[in-house]
Amino acid sequence: MESEDEDSLLGESEEEYSELSDSELQEAFAKGLLKPGMNVLVDEPKKSVNNVLFLCQCCLAELRKDLPWVERLDLTNPPAEDVLSKAEGKAPNPTNGDVNAENDFQREMFFYRQAQATVLEALPLLNKHGIFTKRPDDYFAEMAKSDQQMQKIRKKLISKQMIMEKSEKAKKLREQRKFGKKVQVEVIQKRQKEKKAMMTAVKKYQKGMTDKLDFLEGDQKAGKDSAQGPKKVANKKGPNAKRKYKDQKFGFGGKKSGKKWNTKESFNDVSGFRAKVAHAKGGGKGGNKGKGGKQNKRPGKSVRKKMKSRS
């Protein structure tokens, strides 16, 4: 029964406490009428504000330092005026808003003119503050790299140069070897050619085709020529002795039959006709000469027939 009375009192108290003020609630909590879990503290949600402009101003205020211009050396300039285009009467170059970022020429020209304007404004300011803008004649700039690093670079360059010189020497030696082999082959071919010519000359002499022994004096002539020194000899064009011998023996090739036939041109050509030679009246280059250049005294065929009939 007592528990039921307490529950009824608590239910009433809860209804009452819902409409009570803070002072009344504090008195009820002091008496022990309030239990844990009946009242929960709820935090209010924070309102997130993304104020980008304010944040940027705060960041710039933190980065900004009140330093003189000599320490900062910052300038913001529009592009310089294009004097050349004005003088030539062309359309002026575009300003900052009209530059096409995709056009390389316009973009680079804009950078150039902006740098030109910055220089024109910065030089007077630097001279005003006593800052030198030209390098003195005896200016010595220390290198960023140490001496050890430069020595390493020097050694590397020298080694590369040595390697290149060795490769060039090897290339020259290879070329000289090729040239030496070529000269050696030419000398061997020349000796073989001389040997063949000498053998053909010997064969001709053995067969009785010639009575000259000039081929035996070839070595002596070569020795005299080498002793006198190198001389310019004209290249003689024409067939060699072997070719001449074969041409004389077998002919020149081609058609053999009918080569003595007369043609219209050869019949009308009488430039080589000689009456004295044809009628054997003079001692010219006729076919009536025998060996030793003596005239053939044998009578003709008709005379020999008459002589035969008489006998």
Image (cartoon, rainbow, N blue to C red):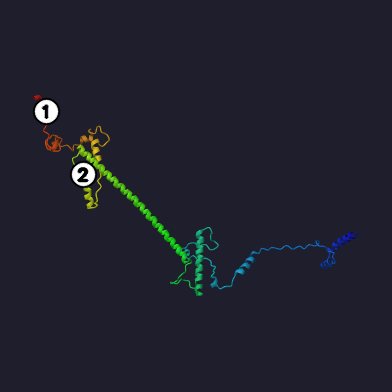
For the residues labelled 2 and 1, the Cα–Cα distance comes to: 50 Å
**Residue 37: where, in percent of width, then height?**
80, 61
Residue 72's disc number? none
| Left or right: where 254 falls relative to 163 | left
**Residue sitting nearer the eye, 33 or 215:** 215
**Residue 191: where, in percent of width, then height?**
27, 45
Disc 1 designates what residue? 304
| Left or right: where 20 falls relative to 282 | right
**Is residue 104 visible in the rendered structure shown here?**
yes
| Amino acid type assigned to the residue bearing label 1 in the image | Arg
Which quadrant holds residue 296? top left
Residue placed furthest toward the right: 1
**Badge 1 density bin: few <14, some 14–19, many ≥20, Cα 10 Å:** few
**Residue sitting nearer the eye, 133 or 170:** 170
**Is residue 289 visible in the rendered structure shown here?**
no
Relative to residue 130, is residue 189 depicted above or below? above
Disc 2 designates what residue? 216
**Which tag, 2 or 1, sits closer to the chain's start?**
2
Are discs 2 and 1 less than 8 Å apart at CB? no
| Left or right: where 196 falls relative to 128 | left
Identify the residue at image location x=10%, y=24%: 309
**Residue 180: where, in percent of width, then height?**
32, 50
Identify the residue at image location x=42%, y=59%: 159
Relative to residue 207, is residue 158 depicted above or below? below
**Residue sitting nearer the eye, 79 or 190:** 190
Relative to residue 173, is residue 305 depicted above or below? above
Q: Secondary structure at mark 2?
A: helix
| Amino acid type assigned to the residue bearing label 2 in the image | Leu
